[in-house]
Amino acid sequence: MLSVLNLRERERERMAINGDDQKPLRQISEAFIGLANTVKNNSNSQTLDQEDVQLETAPFSHACSLVSPLFGCLGIAFKFAEIDYVAKVHDLGEASQSLGTLQLMIDRDVEANCVRKAGSHTRNLLRVKRGLDMVRVLFEQIIATEYVH
């Protein structure tokens, strides 16, 4: 398993090579806006249920990888959460090479009856979602606190 530092260093190198020297929050925002637009366009262009909208695994895992530096800003108390989050996002990135969409990834785990098993892609997806939710709530609290004072 790659260490958190190795994954961070890889991401910094990728950003330097691609010229992605934007501010991290802007990158995160743009990546998730892109995902939201994909979902919106897919659901508007077809008469599908929300569950039928296909979201590609690679762009999702990339957007999630951009969030990982935020965990580092939260201090030592969140170190375990950061390590866990980075490992789970890395797994989703690896899975994206053979499983093109999140729905396909979930379907495969359901077929293999391994959704609840530690290390399954679906379980890792759930852990990543929980990590994103935690960061969202923290930012909401920061914003709410700033307006109060």
Image: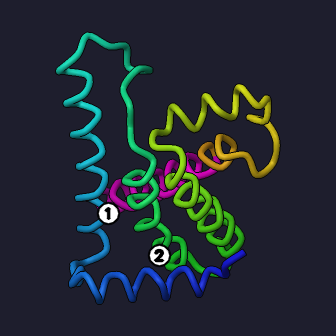
Kind of element beneath mark 1 = helix
Residue 15 on image: x %, y %:
31, 82
The residue wearing badge 1 is: 28
Q: Which mark is residue 69?
A: 2
Please, what is the three-letter code of the amino acid marked with disc 2? Pro
Label 1 or label 2, whichever comes before in sequence order: 1
**Quadrant housing the N terminus:** bottom right
| Residue 108, quarter of the rendered image | top right
At 45% from the left and 47% from the top, the residue drawn is 57
Q: Nearer the viewer, residue 18 or 72?
A: 18
Residue 143 on image: x %, y %:
33, 58
Residue 49 on image: x %, y %:
37, 13
Q: Is residue 12 above or below residue 69?
A: below
Q: Does residue 130 belong to the magenta stretch?
A: yes
Q: Is residue 124 above or below residue 5?
A: above
| Residue 123, quarter of the rendered image | top right
Q: Is residue 97 above or below residue 111?
A: below
**Quadrant housing the C terminus:** bottom left
| Residue 27, quarter of the rendered image | bottom left
Residue 93 on image: x %, y %:
52, 59
Kind of element beneath mark 2 = helix
Q: Which residues are magenta?
A: 127-149
In the visual, does 56 lie left or right of 1?
left
Is the magenta region chiefly helix, strand or loop? helix
